[in-house]
Amino acid sequence: MEIGLTGASGFLGRHIIEQAIAGGDKVVAFSRTPRRQIQGCVRTALFRPGLHLNSLGAIVHLAGESIFGIWTKAKKEHILRSRVEGTRWIVKAIQGAPDPPKVLVCASAIGIYGDRGNEELTERRTTGAGKFLAEVSQAWEAAAQEATTAGTRVVTVRIALVLGGKGALAVMQPVFRLGLGGRFGKGDQWMSWVHIRDIANIFLYAAKTESLSGPVNGASPNPVRNSEFTKVLGSLLKKPTFCTVPSALVSTLLPEQSSLVLDSQRVIPEKLLTSGFEFQFPSLNEALRDLIKVKS
Ligand SMILES: NC(=O)c1ccc[n+]([C@@H]2O[C@H](COP(=O)([O-])OP(=O)(O)OC[C@H]3O[C@@H](n4cnc5c(N)ncnc54)[C@H](OP(=O)(O)O)[C@@H]3O)[C@@H](O)[C@H]2O)c1
């Protein structure tokens, strides 16, 4: 299959390219800076309004302003606009193509559920309200769903915390290696996570599995509490985890962004499990062991 991919230069995009090629697919990258050819792709095209998506089997859409950095008013505007506008360009291209992609697999985030305590969050649960990331993800998914008007199947993958060589784990590891790792607040909030190879596979699986449509939780089947995550990472790195970051401190310093570490989301990938998707790394211990190359 020939797959179009926006955000191809990013953390997740690069893994999707690697796994797509390994599975015999071809990837056409879309980037804001196409002069920089993206390794492994058959070509790199400009990601802009008026882009062409004719004759691609699938389009995978990841592009969006990073959520890392301080959430000023301008940054929040970029986070929202880059996702909704970029998705509208894609939907318009799908609607205008004589031979449009059969499927749009669009990124979304588990932040869409808001802060939900112990509730088990399958795709059948309602989305959250009053939180910035919930609102961004809702607007993003709604924009993507418009592609169904052209007969294109739409899947929105609600991505959990991705564990890999970059992203959150790359920020956590040096802190833990210094023996400064610890839980956030009481540590009883649920963390839903997914190994980078599993999430890259989930995007390719969603592109090829015709029975999947609508929201799909891109999380491992075994979410853990923050205290458990801290304990497992500390023990694999053989470092103490006595430190605690008080929730009041995080909420005072970064009132809105504190939701990234304090909100509780116990996400269950019901649609993937029911459809027969097999996770390579269903347990946190095995996922972290693989990523931090622990010798047993
Ligand atoms: N990693 C996670 O833990 C995680 C969790 C939940 C959701 N997600 C979502 O999944 C998607 C992919 O994640 P990632 O970790 O691979 O992100 P990433 O490394 O930040 O890559 C995102 C890509 O989007 C493009 N981009 C950056 N700023 C943009 C802007 N202002 N407007 C349009 N495009 C822009 C860039 O590609 P070009 O420069 O080539 O255009 C970039 O390579 C993101 O939308 C992210 O929000 C990720």
Image (cartoon, rainbow, N blue to C red):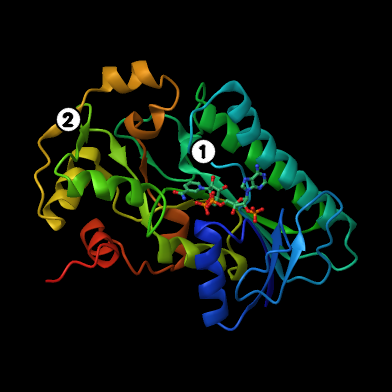
Where does the image place residue 226, in percent across and percent down from the top left?
24, 39
Q: Which mark is residue 244?
A: 2
Whether residue 210 can be seen here: no
Q: Which mark is residue 141?
A: none
For the C terminus, the image quarter is bottom left
Describe residue 204's horizontal placement relative to residue 94 as left or right: left
- The residue positioned 71% from the left and 41% from the top of the image is 143
Q: Which mark is residue 67?
A: 1
Q: Secondary structure at mark 1?
A: loop
Where does the image place residue 198, in percent across and percent down from the top left?
42, 64
Where does the image place residue 146, in percent across and percent down from the top left?
76, 45
Is 161 drawn above or below residue 118 in the view shown? below
Amino acid carrying label 2: it is: Thr
Q: Residues within 10 Å of mark 2 (few under 14, many from 20)?
A: some
Where does the image place residue 221, in percent across and percent down from the top left?
33, 55
Q: Tell me: is circle 1 under 8 Å from ligand 1.
A: yes
Q: How many marks?
A: 2
Q: Secondary structure at mark 2?
A: strand
Instruction: Please report whichever mark, 1 or 2, sits nearer to the chain's N-terminal start.
Output: 1
Please tell me which residue lies in front, 84 or 157: 84
Report the Cα–Cα distance between label 1 and label 2: 24 Å
Q: Quadrant of residue 97?
A: bottom right
